[in-house]
Image (cartoon, grey):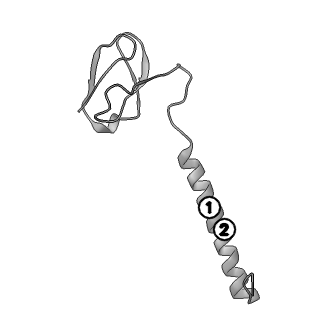
Amino acid sequence: MIHFRCPSCDKRLRVSDDGYAGRRGRCTCGTLFVIPLPGNRRMVKILNEDEPTTSCGWLAFIFISLVAMCFGLFMLYVYCCVGFMPGD
């Protein structure tokens, strides 16, 4: 169970599952916020209506992973088919 307070009206709020941490929530006063991590009662961020709540960190991770994989496959091709490695 996560316990925290609304950043606007200071009302005590709680959610039943840790799976809600990081998701958007709305108080009965109308304030939109991000539900904090368990044990972090005061770190609640007020959001604008149009502000996105998810980051693109996972997208950057996938892109960098794909680039690294393509570079690795290219180096394997060069080593196997051409027969040399850079620096040889």
Helix, strand or loop under label 2: helix
User: How far apart, in angstroms, are the residues tagged by discs 2 and 1?
Assistant: 6 Å
Tag 1 residue:
66
User: Of the residues shown, which amino acid type is indicated by label 1?
Assistant: Leu
Quadrant location, the N terminus? top left
Tag 2 residue:
70
Q: Position of residue 29 (x, y in %)?
A: 37, 9
Q: Residue, x 53% and y 19% (percent of image)?
A: 48
Q: Residue, x 69% and y 77% (percent of image)?
A: 75
Residue 50 location, quadrant? top right
Helix, strand or loop under label 1: helix
Quadrant location, the C terminus? bottom right
Residue 3 vs residue 46: left or right?
left
Q: Residue, x 66% and y 68% (percent of image)?
A: 70
Q: Position of residue 53 (x, y in %)?
A: 50, 31
Residue 43 vs residue 86: left or right?
left
Q: Position of residue 59 (x, y in %)?
A: 58, 48
Residue 71, above or below 76: above
Near mark 2 (Cα within 10 A), the count class, few <14, some 14-19 or many ≥20, is few
Q: Residue, x 57% and y 55% (percent of image)?
A: 62
Q: Position of residue 87 (x, y in %)?
A: 75, 83
Q: What number is the disc on residue 55?
A: none
User: Of the residues shown, which amino acid type is indicated by label 2?
Assistant: Cys
Near mark 1 (Cα within 10 A), the count class, few <14, some 14-19 or many ≥20, is few
Q: Are marks 2 and 1 in contact (CB under 8 Å)?
A: yes
